[in-house]
Structures are given as C-alpha cells and as structure tokens.
Image: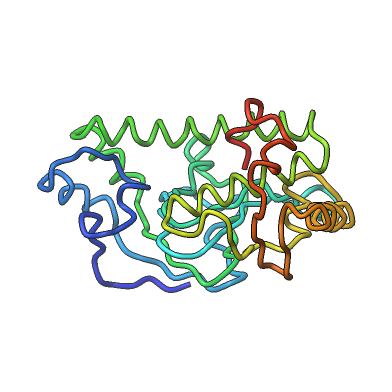
Amino acid sequence: MTDNTFKVACSNCNLRELCMPIGLEIADMKKLDEVVATRRQVKQGQRLFGNGDAFTSLYAIRTGFFKTCISNEDGREQVTGFQMAGEIIGLDGIVTDQHSCNAVALEDAEVCVMPFSNVEELSREFPVLQRHVHKVMSREIVRENGMMMMLGNMRAEERLAAFLLNLVQRLHARGFSQSEMILRMTREEIGSYLGLKLETISRTFSKLSDDGIIEVKQRYVKILAPDELKKIFNPQSCQTCI
C-alpha cells in the first residue's frame, strides 16, 4: 500500500454526492476538504486494514471494489460485505477503537483517508457532516438486519436475485449500466456472503440463465428480464440486502 502525498479535494470529486453530505455551499465544501488527509492505493488482494488493527481513519472508496470478511475459528473466511466507489468503510472500528474485520481489495483500488479525529472535529462545526456519518452507520445497521432476514428466510434463488438486483442498482447510481455488470467477486465469495455453498451458487446461476432471466459469461452478467428477477424474491423484505 502506498500513500499519495498530493492533497485530495472533495469539492472537485465527482463522487462527493455519494460519500459526502449534499446541499453544502461551495465554501463549506472546501472546508470539508480538510477531512481527507491523503489518498491510498491498495493493490488487488491487499488489505486496507485487518481484524485487530487500531482504528484511526474512515476510508472513502474512490475507485475499485473491496470485500470485508472475518475468519471463523477453523480458519474459513466469512464474507460480510462488498463495497464500491463512493462508499465509506472502516466504521466497524469506531466502537472499540480497533477493526473487527479485514477489508481486502478485489481489484486495484484507491481510497481517500479520513482521519477520524478530523471527522469528529469538523462534525462539531458542521452538524450536517455528523448527521451524514450517523446516516452511513444507520445504513450499515439496516443492511446487516436485511442480511440476517435474507439468510434466515430466503431460498437460494431469492438470495441471488436480491444480490444481483441490489448490486446493479448500486452500480447504476454510479453511472454504470442498468442491466450489465462485471462481477469483481468470485462465486465462492458470493456464496460465502449469501450463506450458500459454491455448488449451490453455480447451480442457481445456471438455472437463472436457463430460464432466460440472466445471461452469464464467466464474471459478465446481463439481466435480461429484470421484472422476472424481481418476482423471485419479496422486495419488501430485502430492499437493503447486500
């Protein structure tokens, strides 16, 4: 991992509406530039932070994809989430001052480093920033609750449908296609996240493809029949899963 020495300007970033409060004046937005210290580049497969590391900063993903995961007692990895550009990671460390999971880059990535002391100091000056941090934390709680519901109540097809729809929705909010995507994570990682075995994930992908709902070519996925995919699961029960 390397830190770039040049200063980051949130006010000039095209992702600011995704990871920073909206509705600020330009002058206030420039003050928020003080939140970010540097950019950090993380190579594919490297950790941004690890379980047990001291918590010092939040990280706004500028480019790339990450997964967060924990290791079970027997050494197996359990994926707990996937994060993309415009999202903030590192919130897990706020409570105990140390991280409770690993954050691993799924592809070469770049993050903006936001020392938490800076965030706290500016939050006192800008209550809107404090509310934004609370909103991000709340979204994570809602997402975790939705995940628990999905793992407890949904069949394999429903879990994968919810995952694909939510992922393409998040990507579309960042200017990507409404129907096509390249999966940065492996099927094994998807299975770990959804609580399904690899063979079950592969079989479910094949079934959705055979039914003409999606087209799959290795990691390329195209949603051919979004309405049919939505019918597979109950959207009221899992709007925030993943």
In this picture, residue 165 sits left or right of residue 73: left
The residue lying at 48 percent from left, 72 percent from top is 1
Give the quarter of the image for residue 12: bottom left
The answer to which of 189 and 6 lies nearer the viewer is 189
The residue lying at 72 percent from left, 48 percent from top is 193
The answer to which of 162 and 17 lies nearer the viewer is 162
Task: Residue at the far left: name it.
Answer: 27
Res. 59 visible in picture: no
In this picture, residue 52 sits left or right of residue 218: left
The residue lying at 77 percent from left, 35 percent from top is 151
Res. 231 visible in picture: yes
The residue lying at 53 percent from left, 73 percent from top is 43
Numbered-mark total: 0
Q: Position of residue 68 (x, y in %)?
A: 62, 52
In this picture, is 24 found above or below 1? above
In this picture, residue 111 sits left or right of residue 23: right
Give the quarter of the image for residue 75: bottom right
Q: Which quarter of the image is occupied by the C terminus? A: top right
Q: Position of residue 18 (x, y in %)?
A: 37, 47
Q: Position of residue 69 (x, y in %)?
A: 67, 51
The answer to which of 163 and 16 lies nearer the viewer is 163
